[in-house]
Amino acid sequence: MLHTVSLPNPCVSYPKTTCHSRSPRNLKRGRFRVSATLSEPNGAKVEYTPWLIVGLGNPGNKYHGTRHNVGFEMIDRISQEERIVMNTIQSKALIGIGSIGEVPILIAKPQGYMNFSGESVGPLAAYYQVPLRHILLVYDEMSLPNGVLRIQPRGGHGYHNGVKSVMEHLDGRREFPRFCIGIGDPPGTMDMKAFLLQKFSDMERKEIDKALDQGVDAVRSLVSYGFNDRITRFNLGQKYKYNKV
């Protein structure tokens, strides 16, 4: 059963920017914080900042399993492995709230089409008061070989319309993490759109499934420890994963 959460039309605003909302008063009342506070043995309290993990894709069976929807697949895999139920519609997105270890996370799949993904990400980040550095965007990347993963702390949109939409709804800011899933380039003179909306071959499917498993571990590491040597080693291992020694 799906549940629907209604809220005002907030946008997320960062320093030196202006937030445009049709109802500022309602925005203030509508904000909600997801957090976890634990007590240490010495009596000190530790509060964990939540993460918003968003997979990009297109809704509907027509697009299920296509190259452009691997972001959705990554969210599905996290939902399955971390046992997070996704049964709520909020800000035009299917969402689930849970945790990785002690860190609270909100996972989401925007249900508008790819080019309008920002209409979900911006309001969700504002409503749950997730800082920019904890918004992890997961999406397909043609510049990477099929099944190769890469995690970065920031970046541009790389002509990806979904990422471009998200940046527009985050006041044009680009300082949020990205999790890129390689899908390779279109072969020969194949049309790019046709390639993106095509399903994977059997061999490519095996590579993607293996990559998704590796991706869950990488997300766990990022959420738990941030950008450290673990992520550096992960990216390096992914870069050369198909190189034979």
Image (cartoon, rainbow, N blue to C red):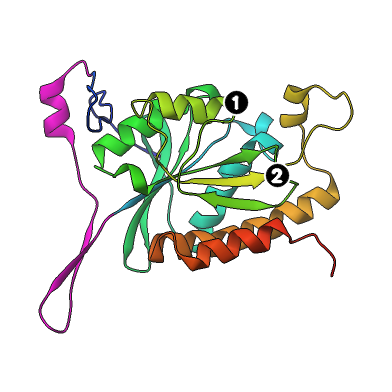
* Residue designated by label 1: 159
Q: Please provide the residue range marked out in magenta.
A: 21-49
Looking at numbered disc 1 in the image, what kind of residue is underneath it? Tyr
Q: Is 213 situated above or below 40?
A: above
**Is residue 28 covered in magenta?**
yes
Task: Identify the residue under disc 2.
Answer: 144
Secondary structure of residue under mark 1? loop
- Percent across and percent down for residue 218 are 53, 61
Q: Splitting the image into 4 quarters, where does residue 222 fall? A: bottom left
Q: Residue at x 47, y 63 (%)?
A: 220
- In the displayed structure, 120 sits above or below 207; it is above
Q: Residue at x 69, y 56 (%)?
A: 239
Q: Residue 19, can we see it?
A: yes
Residue 179 against residue 215 in the figure, above or below: above
Magenta region includes residue 177: no
Which of 15/34 is in front? Answer: 15
Q: Give above or below for 60 relative to 149.
A: above
Identity of the residue drawn at 51% across and 33% down: 156
Taking depth in this image into account, of 54 and 133 the one nearest to the observer is 133
